[in-house]
């Protein structure tokens, strides 16, 4: 029988917020390579909220050397959204799976600006916002990534 080690402890689900461009960069790094069906994004115009249900790769997984790569379902939500536009996203094709590459903020006047969700394959979603206010929250337990591998990018 071996004593428990700190590394054996359960990791807690992410529940992070972003209120400026630097915070958003942290969320972006954690959401990089998340995949989601085109049907799992929604804009509530009245509430001024845009959200995505992502299958996020767990880049922060400290136990990755002890088990297969993992994903977890997470909600990435943005508040204060005034307008949503997309390019290269066919919302009519319900079978399309999108891959999130990055989330960035392009400042405008005062605290307003655009949040740009860059997708693989030259797609993008632009959110015009009054101010940066975003959350990334894990909503399921981690599961083994179907590919059983870590996402790789061409350099």
Image (tube, rainbow, N blue to C red):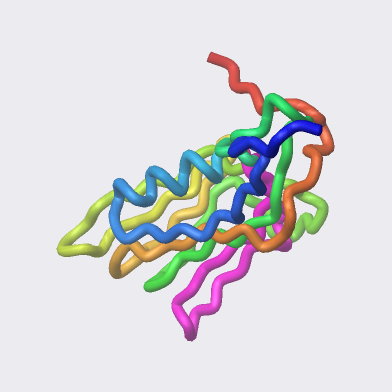
Q: Quadrant of residue 6?
A: top right
Q: Is residue 82 at all visible to an observer of this figure?
A: no
Taking the view exactly as shown, the residue that stands out farthest to the bottom is 46
With 25 as the anchor, is 125 left or right in this view?
right
Taking the view exactly as shown, the residue that stands out farthest to the top is 155
Taking the view exactly as shown, the residue that stands out farthest to the left is 110
In this rendering, the count of numbered labels is: 0
Residue at figure coordinates x 58%, y 36% from the top left: 59
Q: Is residue 55 magenta?
A: yes
Q: Is residue 108 at all visible to an observer of this figure?
A: yes
Q: Is residue 60 magenta?
A: no
Residue at figure coordinates x 52%, y 47% from the top left: 124
Q: Main secondary structure of the magenta part?
A: strand
Rendered view: 88 above or below 49: above
Q: Quadrant of the N terminus?
A: top right
Q: Which residues are magenta?
A: 33-57
Residue 47, given in percent of the width and then of the height, sits at 47, 83
With 104 as the anchor, is 35 left or right in this view?
right
Residue 73, given in percent of the width and then of the height, sits at 69, 55
With 96 as the anchor, is 80 left or right in this view?
left
**Nearer to the camera, 90 or 70:** 70
Residue at figure coordinates x 30%, y 50% from the top left: 21
Rendered view: 72 above or below 84: above
Q: Quadrant of residue 126?
A: bottom left
With 81 as the anchor, is 122 left or right in this view?
right
Residue 106, given in percent of the width and then of the height, sits at 30, 49
Residue at figure coordinates x 60%, y 34% from the top left: 62
Residue 91, given in percent of the width and then of the height, sits at 69, 59
């Amino acid at each position: 029988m071996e004593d428990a080690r700190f590394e054996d402890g359960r990791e807690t689900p992410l529940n992070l917020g972003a209120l400026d461009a630097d915070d958003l960069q942290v969320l972006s790094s954690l959401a990089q390579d998340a995949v989601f069906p085109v049907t799992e994004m929604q804009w509530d115009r009245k509430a001024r909220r845009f959200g995505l249900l992502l299958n996020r790769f767990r880049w922060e997984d400290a136990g990755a050397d002890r088990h297969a790569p993992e994903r977890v379902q997470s909600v990435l939500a943005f508040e204060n959204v005034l307008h949503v536009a997309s390019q290269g996203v066919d919302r009519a094709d319900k079978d399309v799976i999108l891959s999130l590459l990055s989330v960035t903020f392009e400042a405008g006047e005062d605290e307003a600006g655009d949040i740009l969700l860059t997708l693989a394959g030259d797609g993008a979603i632009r959110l015009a916002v009054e101010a940066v206010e975003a959350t990334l929250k894990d909503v399921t337990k981690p599961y083994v990534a179907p590919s059983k591998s870590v996402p790789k990018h061409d350099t």
